[in-house]
Amino acid sequence: MVASLLIGNILLIAITVSHPMYQAASKRHMLTDGFTNYLEEKNSYPMVVRTYGRMRKGTGRSETNALSEFVANIDKLSGVPVKEKVCYLNLVTSTAKSLTLHDGLDSEQKIMIGALEGLEEHSKILSGRMYNPGIGEDGFIEAVISQSAMIEMNLLVGEELEFTNVKDSSGAPLKIRVTGVYTNSDANDIYWYIGPDYYDSTLMIDAGFFRNTFMAKGTKYQLNETYTVLFDYEAVRPEDVDGLITFSTDMVTAYKTVYSEIDEPAYVAILENFRGEENRISVTLAILQVPVIVLLCAFIFMISRQMLEMEENEIALLKSRGASKKQILAMYFMQSAILSGVSFLIGIPVGILVCRILGASSAFLQFNARRVLKVELTGEVMLYGLAAVLLSMGMTLIPVFRRDKHSIVAVKRRRSRSEKPVWQKLFLDIILLGVSLYGLYNFRNQQSEMYARVLAGKSLDPLIFLASSLFILGAGMASLRLHSLIVSLIYRVGKKQWSPAVYTSFLQLIRTRNKSAFIMVFLVLTVSFGLFNTTVARTILANAEKNIDYMQGADVVLTEYWKNNVAYLQIDPNAKVTFTEPDFGKYGQIKGLKSLAKVFRSSTASLQAGSKAISSDLVAIDTKTFGETTDLDAKYLKYDFRDYLNVLSRNSNAVLLSSNFRDKQGLKVGDTVTYSLSGGYFSGTLNAKVYGFFDYWPSYNPEKITILADESVQTSDNYMIVAHLSTIQEAVGIFPYEIWIDMDGDTDGFYDFANDEALKITKLGDASKMKEDITVEPLFQGTNGILTMSFITILLICAIGYVIYWMLSIRSRELLFGIFRAMGMTRGEIIKMLACEQAFTGLFGIAFGLIVGWIASVLYVPIIQIAYSAADRALPLELITKGTDVARLIVIIFIMFAACMGVLIRQVYNMKISQALKLGED
Amino acid sequence: MNIIETKNVDRVFGLTGGEQFYALKDVSVGIKTGALTILKGPSGSGKTTLMNILGALDAPSNGEVLFDGKEIGAMTEEEKGKLRRENFGFVFQSVSLIPIMTVFENVDFALRLAGYEGDRAERVNKCLKMVGLAARAQHMPQELSGGEQQRVAIARAIAHRPKVVFADDPTAELDSQTAISVVNIFKELVKEEGVTIVMTTHDTSLMSAGDAVYTLEAGICSGG
């Protein structure tokens, strides 16, 4: 008993503290992801600040100095450690005359004298040698050049240059000798954020010497000082983000002068994006945990009430010996404080474990052990833990307070009466149901606004999640009313025929409603939350995956790079653009290839419907290969997908149109239509005959959602024309098309092929990778993790609660069993009686739970799902419940029943009638 | 004619430490049909143990118990249940009513168990009238006084017309006035329904009511 109270407490604390821990960890993960995604996509370091200082003949010095000082302290000011700081100094372009004339060298050219601090450590010499600092005895300053400078400026090692308009302090022109060619020593060195090729007209001299010569006090050279600061983005913590955004935007304005400037840093967008996501996640995940915390509280309340009932006699005894109310309360307070303290100590490590499990979840009830989340103990975590302790102490002490109000006599009397549970007297269940349904009604009416919110990166109204929990809670309680109604009805129907065992169990159920009510509600809640949770988790994931498959069309969709003469347009705008089709036959070599299709797409087609030109998407296909490569579930179409293709294949001028052409524009099958294509480099007008309409087509989204400036959402129709590829190519020419690839199994074969062929790809989509990606998205992952954890927790507390309830129920009825046995009831009959009781609470609990869970899913999942995939929902939502999840749930509950029955049977068999009867003799 | 007989019955309890405690030692008694037999003795003398053995609620360690000449020890649990259900009625020292049932249902329950053939409601009402509680039929047991509860227990014990009614110190928690009225009910039952009654008591004032009195002292029985 105490053990289960402890378990309840530990779970409560663990789950509560896991929340901030998981959030912190996953936010961190998300933030780092934001940076690394940028790195991968743009192939550029994600967190960089570039500053420019300009000194012009005696002005700009103080501004530049202020900027340099700012850069020197930027780590302290921003709070983010700096990984690399590169300072590039250069004199403005000056004219140099080569002293060593050789072929191909202009006698005079524009060259910059510059210096990169730290160049010596970060570069290697390809030919010649590194410069020596200072002016040599022969009056030459030594410099190195990059490979690009060598080519651009046509310089050689050993070249000597004289700068006629750059003079030293004595007034003599500056002379520089090229001693070597440098390049970056390590390809991945972030020092070369700006690569050596960039310095294609700079002679690099020693930086210290540069400063002494050109930047000393009193000198009046025109020069630039450029800093590139690379921050250690992995050190950015989620809590720093706000400050960092302000810092970064402030610095841009603060240093904006004629002489100094800071580039608007690109990483601010990453941070801002994170801030939006973060908000969405924390609210969503917090609300998801509410039901399980409520249930845990209820569990603790129930156990502590039961415990109190057992200790009633002791309390009465203590009271009769003169213990005051205060003393008894203090005693229980101490007891619960100790319990909570122990739970706190154990709960925190368990919370860390829970958090790890959350991080490893890849789908509902599925884990991927390789994923490791960095978990930290922070002050916030401790605060949550403390709050959980207070909550659990409250839950333990409430029954004590309540009990204390009644005298022992009143308690005994109350026990005997069949009393309605408090919530039924207060109509709490009806109120809860009302509130949750009202919420649902409201949300249904605001669906478009909800889309807008989510698309704008805001969190979904937390009340929607709460409403679903309230609904389950309310319906769970309300099902009790139905339960007692049904039980009384069955009892009445067969009142005369019931065997004594069944008769007694009916009376037990009907007359001790209050006691069994709690466990019934618990059971209903377990099953319905279980069902609801699996439905939410499965539905969200399955629909996201389904949409990916649908929008993608095939396992791999790619566009290869086509050689073209587009660049030539800059010279001759009227030139005819030609694209060279790469070899298509080679794709046949892909290992594990099932089929291939060429698909030409254009989003700038338009179709003449009456007097209006409707802009539309166009997909041009080869019906045979298209049908082999892609598919569409029959439920989205009126006829079989292949039938559409067969119909289309009958006529090369046939087109299929999206059904909104029919419904909104009044076109019908058999109409002759004119449509035109006007892409960037192609145009053409074609006549076609409409052969059919479709609601859905691979990669076709019937609705276009746009967010307006005022953040409201506008949905507009999206049109699509499906035509023959050969017809389109004939009309407008051959332009880059997509290649849709259907693979047998995984896509590894494709990547091997792409590698071997060194494919140049301009666009690539891999459905399996996209699906994999969504499972690691913190929102998805957190949702799965929390739903799984809640499910397991609910199951656990339900099992414990159930067994405890029965054990106590039996114990408190031992005398009664003795009487039954004395009156001639056999053990078998007593077990039958208990089994019947269990069946009526258990089976009803499961049945009600399934019904409530299903109704809740149907009502609330479509709305909850908005939070997860507002942007890409082309296909209608489908509720997914995995039978195995439900089966698992029911099997576990049945095991629980069986365990209970086992214990009960043992107890009944071991019971000595004469001893049981003695219990009555006190 | 004895309806129940014990022959050299011992009831031994093993105590912690390996000692043996004889709750009953070599007890041979005969319960006469249609008579009120009283088992008396101080608490701990073994009278409840003996009654439990007579009522097939407990089994003797040695010796045998015969009901209508049949050895009870040879019966299965099932048969003992049937025996109790059909032939025995019990009244216990303290409250023995089923708390979830009304007074009426409590009495009715005994009839259900025994598979009573006739009109159950009529029989229940008759029994309740016999103990003077017909008016309280629809009350819950907790709403009655101790004496009333005991009278309901008696009504329940006799309802299915058992051959023997066992009453284990039924007056223990009653005031003497009520106790006498309970014993009077027993006497009437013996006279009118012809039941055999076995009653234990430590109240010496009730001895005179018995047709036969056995005295138990530290597990040893005398009298008859």
Image (cartoon, grey):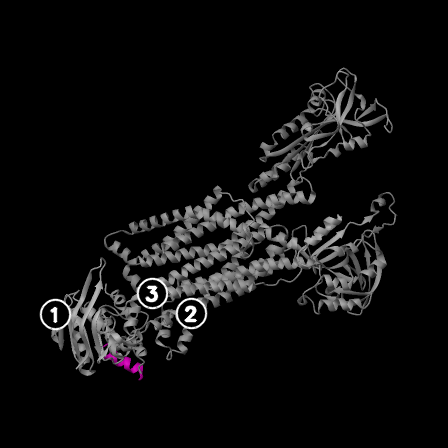
CA distance for labels 3 and 2: 18 Å
Q: Position of residue B86 (x, y in %)?
A: 28, 79
Closer to the N terminus: mark 3 or mark 2? Answer: 2
Residue under pointer 2: A839
The amino acid at mark 3 is: Gln
Q: Chain of mark 3?
A: A
Q: Chain of mark 1?
A: B
Q: Position of residue A658 (x, y in %)?
A: 74, 64
Q: Position of residue B114 (x, y in %)?
A: 30, 79
Q: Which residues are magenta?
A: B117-132
CA distance for labels 1 and 3: 39 Å
CA distance for labels 2 and 1: 51 Å
Q: Is residue A81 visible?
A: yes
**What crowding class fits label 2: few (fewer than 14 Cα within 10 Å), some (14-19), or many (20 or more)?**
some
The amino acid at mark 2 is: Ala
Same chain? Circles 1 and 3 = no
**What crowding class fits label 1: few (fewer than 14 Cα within 10 Å), some (14-19), or many (20 or more)?**
few
- The reply, left or right, for residue A365 in relation to residue A712 is left
Residue under pointer 1: B204
- The reply, left or right, for residue A325 in relation to residue A42 is left
Quarter in which the C terminus of chain A is drawn = bottom left
**In front of the other: B68 or A570:** B68
- The reply, left or right, for residue A750 in relation to residue A340 is right
Majority secondary structure of magenta residues: helix
Residue under pointer 3: A907
Q: Is label 1 or label 3 in front? A: 3
In the image, is residue A637 above or below residue A789? below
Q: Chain of mark 2?
A: A
Magenta span contains residue A365 = no
